[in-house]
Image (spheres, rainbow, N blue to C red):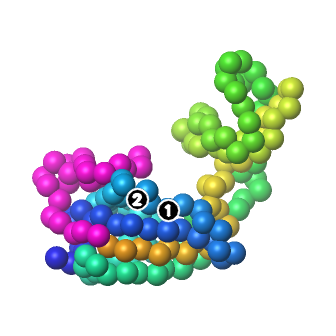
Amino acid sequence: MKIDKDTVVTIEYRLTDNDGNLLEESVADEEFAYLHGHEQLLEALEAELQGKEAGDQVQVSIAPEKGFGERDEEMMITVTRDKFPAEEELQEGLQVEAETDHGHQIFTIQSVDEENVTLDGNHPYAGYHLNFDVTVSAVREATPEELDHGHAHDGHHHH
């Protein structure tokens, strides 16, 4: 079966940047399954997987503008420490969710001191060239329930 809209695709993948640093990879004993055509993966990656079958390997290099965008320094904000619960342990690199004018947003903590916390609203991979090395493990029709929910039900999935 070929990958097409409304198929559930199980993949193994490695994601590296242009310097060869491993950013992310699928976990060996946990399959990563997604519903194709429902904006769960980057569009540029889905486009490359379209029409592939189980056993196919795909290497895709995605430039920042097709990935998570370029870094935007205006997405850096500084808030006072008291905006966070006192018991919350804040450290650099930690991801926190904050309420903004645009609704919930994920920020990465850049720095913390006694009074202030500097948050980075850029996606962690903003500005990165994303190099995906993907192996298609399985392709099947999505169930009506999966189509209704808009995501695959086996394996773990990112919301």
Q: Residue at x 62, y 37 (%)?
A: 96
Q: Residue at x 59, y 36 (%)?
A: 97
Say what amino acid the circle numbered 2 marks. Answer: Ala
Can you see residue 119? no
Q: Where is residue 119 in the image (x, y as percent from the top left)?
A: 73, 42
Q: Which residue is drawn at 55% across and 75% down?
A: 131
Which residue does the numbered mark 2 point to in the structure image? 28
Q: Residue 91 lies in what quarter of the image?
A: top right
Mark 1 residue crowding within 10 angstroms, few (<14) / some (14–19) / many (20+): some
- Tally the marks: 2
In-image side of 74 versus 61 (left or right): right
Q: Position of residue 35 (x, y in %)?
A: 28, 60
Front one among 152 and 82: 152
Confirm whether the magenta stretch covers residue 154: yes
The quadrant in which the N terminus is found is bottom left
Q: Where is residue 8 in the image (x, y as percent from the top left)?
A: 24, 62
Most extreme residue toward the left is 144
Question: Is residue 30 depicted above or below 15 in this figure?
Answer: above
Residues in magenta, as a range: 137-159
Question: Is residue 100 depicted above or below 33 in this figure?
Answer: above
Which residue does the numbered mark 1 point to in the structure image? 25
Question: Is residue 8 depicted above or below 93 in this figure?
Answer: below
